[in-house]
């Protein structure tokens, strides 16, 4: 046996269905067309429009551009000739040259695309950096940057020569550790 609320819901759905059937019958009696779903060609056209819009989305293009850039860097790195086995055992490891001082990226103001150019930072981590900065304010230092999930002391040290900070941190509390005061009971 349905409950009173279920009876009301069934009555509502029956009324909506009857109204729809009535409108269709009225239009058919006046010589108008019935409301029907689009034809197969209309559906195919709509699907093609949606697919082309998705393919042109900026976020997808930025991801593809970053992937092409990484693949080109890998190919360029692999194309370098390997040193002789005897000399490689005695030579120091190859280090990246220090970045120029004017090419530093300001993490308190840079866009996600610029942050992706840093070593070991991909699109997802760059997005988290920007989202954290927008939510909690400027980082101010490498210590402030480490509040972003995925950035630890090792990554901070790796990018330290390539970044700068122009802002002043808004809060000193790291996200997730702030304490909420208890409400007092009202008599």
Image (spheres, helix red, strand yellow):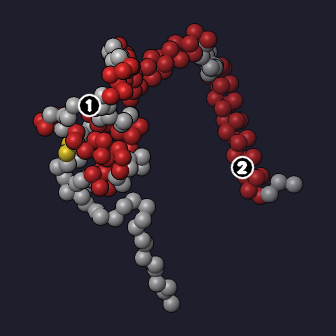
- Give the residue pinned by disc 1: 96
* The quadrant where residue 69 appears: top left
* The quadrant where residue 97 appears: top left
Element on which disc 1 rests:
loop
Q: Which label belongs to residue 140?
A: none
Q: Residue at x 74, y 47 (%)?
A: 11
Q: Earlier in the sequence, mark 1 or mark 2?
A: 2
Whether tag 1 and tag 2 are in contact, CB under 8 A, the answer is: no
Position of 101 relative to 177 (above/below):
above
Residue situated in front as seen by the camera: 138 or 13: 138
Q: Residue furthest bottom?
A: 187
User: As drawn, is 5 to the left or to the right of 67?
Assistant: right
Position of 114 relative to 158 (above/below):
above
- Give the residue pinned by disc 2: 9
User: As drawn, is 170 to the left or to the right of 63?
Assistant: left
Q: Quadrant of the N terminus?
A: bottom right
Q: CA distance from mark 1 to mark 2?
A: 69 Å
Position in image of residue 110 (x %, y %): 24, 40
Q: Residue furthest left?
A: 102
Q: Residue at x 30, y 31 (%)?
A: 92
For residue 72, say whether it is visible: no
Element on which disc 2 rests:
helix
Residue situated in front as seen by the camera: 183 or 113: 113
Position of 142 relative to 69 (above/below):
below
Position in image of residue 26 (x %, y %): 65, 25
Residue situated in front as seen by the camera: 26 or 167: 167
């Amino acid at each position: 046996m349905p409950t009173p609320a279920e009876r009301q819901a069934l009555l509502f759905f029956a009324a909506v269905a009857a109204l729809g059937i009535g409108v269709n019958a009225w239009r058919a009696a006046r010589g108008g067309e019935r409301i029907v779903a689009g034809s197969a060609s209309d559906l195919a056209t709509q699907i093609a429009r949606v697919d082309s819009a998705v393919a042109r989305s900026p976020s997808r293009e930025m991801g593809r551009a970053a992937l092409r850039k990484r693949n080109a860097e890998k190919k360029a790195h692999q194309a370098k000739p390997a040193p002789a086995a005897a000399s490689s055992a005695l030579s120091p490891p190859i280090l990246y040259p220090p970045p120029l001082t004017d090419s530093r990226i300001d993490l308190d103001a840079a866009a996600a695309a610029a942050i992706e150019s840093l070593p070991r930072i991909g699109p997802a981590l760059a997005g988290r950096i920007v989202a954290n900065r927008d939510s909690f304010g400027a980082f101010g230092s490498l210590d402030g940057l480490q509040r972003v999930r995925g950035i630890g002391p090792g990554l901070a040290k790796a990018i330290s020569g390539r970044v700068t900070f122009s802002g002043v941190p808004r809060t000193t509390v790291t996200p997730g550790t702030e304490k909420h005061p208890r409400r007092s009971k009202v008599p």
